[in-house]
Image: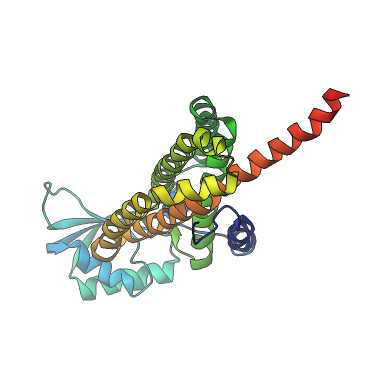
């Protein structure tokens, strides 16, 4: 008998997720998100320094004003060059006084420069693009349900998609709680999380399907079936998530400043994906199956009459 009754204690796992998601939704509506310049627009400043400078120098100077997340790139430089005279900075929209302070700090910290261009720009990710991204996500979920229903049964598909929705809501909740910046890389992180999570869930569902016929020939109950299947795939699931998390931690701690929010989203999403595959998707399938069995049992006497 398994020590941890995953399917039998589904209410506990559902309650934990519900508390986090509900609190996150409340935070989303009250506090909102910290959208980056990809969503809100900002200011582009193109500078030509008297000497070649590194991106880290400029970023350190901007960090004094909380602008370390700005996009900084060397322009007119060959690939692989770490220093250049021409530097383009794309940052959030600034008031005139703040802009002057930032420019003065860069001159003091990095060196003298000439301003080649300075202009305000609009958002690179518009409302239409966001709508299309959401629509594509919904269509992908429908296709996942259809495919999994074909390969397994429709309950597996519904449970898998609900687990994916769970993971996305968890990531959104954490970003709203922490106030971390959301930019174009965040969308890429969400899509990566969806791909990882559905793969882990399908592995467990495939084992449930393999055990299904043999299990019920022996008169077993569905809770024991799910617990056995989860524990049979648990080692693989943990090895996979730990391997992915180690590399993502390395990206978070040793990567550049602009990749930290992307790596953070992956860390939260991979952790949530592993949790949902084990504690959410499989128990959801049990709930859906038991609901179907009850309907069949209720319909049987009516048919007999």
Where in the figure is residue 160, as x and y percent of width and height? Answer: 52, 41
Residue 137 or residue 206, whichever sits in front: 206
Q: Quadrant of residue 97?
A: bottom left
Q: How is the image coloured?
A: rainbow
Residue 18 shown left or right of residue 73 in the figure: right
Q: What residue occupies the far front of the structure in this picture?
A: 218
Residue 299 or residue 282, whichever sits in front: 299
At a point 37% along the width and 73% down the height, the residue shown is 65
Where in the figure is residue 267, as x and y percent of width and height? Answer: 38, 58
Residue 213 shown left or right of residue 60 in the figure: right
Q: Quadrant of residue 72?
A: bottom left
At a point 36% along the width and 70% down the height, the residue shown is 100
Q: Quadrant of residue 125?
A: top left
Residue 41: tell me if it is visible.
no
At a point 23% along the width and 71% down the height, the residue shown is 107
Q: Work out whether 186 lies above or below 105.
A: above
Where in the figure is residue 217, as x and y percent of width and height? Answer: 55, 34
């Amino acid at each position: 008998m398994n020590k941890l009754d995953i399917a039998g204690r589904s209410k506990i796992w559902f309650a934990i997720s519900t508390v986090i998601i509900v609190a996150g939704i409340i935070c989303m509506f009250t506090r909102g998100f910290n959208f980056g310049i990809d969503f809100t627009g900002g200011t582009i400043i193109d500078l030509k320094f008297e000497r070649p400078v590194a991106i880290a120098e400029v970023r350190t100077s901007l960090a004094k004003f909380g602008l370390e997340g700005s996009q900084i790139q060397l322009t007119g430089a060959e690939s692989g060059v770490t220093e250049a005279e021409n530097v383009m900075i794309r940052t959030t929209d600034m008031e005139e006084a703040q802009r002057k302070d930032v420019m003065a700090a860069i001159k003091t910290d990095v060196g003298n420069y000439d301003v080649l261009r300075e202009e305000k720009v609009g958002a690179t990710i518009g409302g239409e693009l966001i709508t299309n991204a959401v629509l594509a996500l919904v269509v992908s979920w429908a296709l996942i349900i259809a495919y999994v229903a074909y390969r397994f049964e429709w309950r597996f598909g519904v449970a898998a998609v609900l687990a994916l929705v769970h993971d996305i809501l968890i990531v959104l909740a954490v970003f709203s709680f922490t106030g971390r910046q959301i930019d174009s890389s965040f969308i890429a992180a969400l899509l990566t999380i969806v791909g990882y999570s559905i793969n882990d869930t399908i592995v467990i569902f495939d084992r449930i399907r393999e055990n299904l016929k043999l299990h019920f020939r022996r008169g077993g109950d569905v809770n024991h079936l799910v617990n056995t299947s989860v524990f049979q795939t648990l080692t693989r699931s943990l090895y996979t998530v730990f391997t992915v998390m180690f590399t993502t931690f390395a990206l978070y701690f040793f990567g550049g400043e602009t990749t930290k929010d992307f790596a953070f989203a992956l860390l939260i999403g991979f952790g949530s994906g592993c949790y949902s595959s084990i504690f959410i998707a499989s128990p959801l399938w049990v709930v859906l199956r038991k609901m179907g069995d009850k309907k069949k049992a209720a319909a049987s006497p009516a048919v007999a009459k």
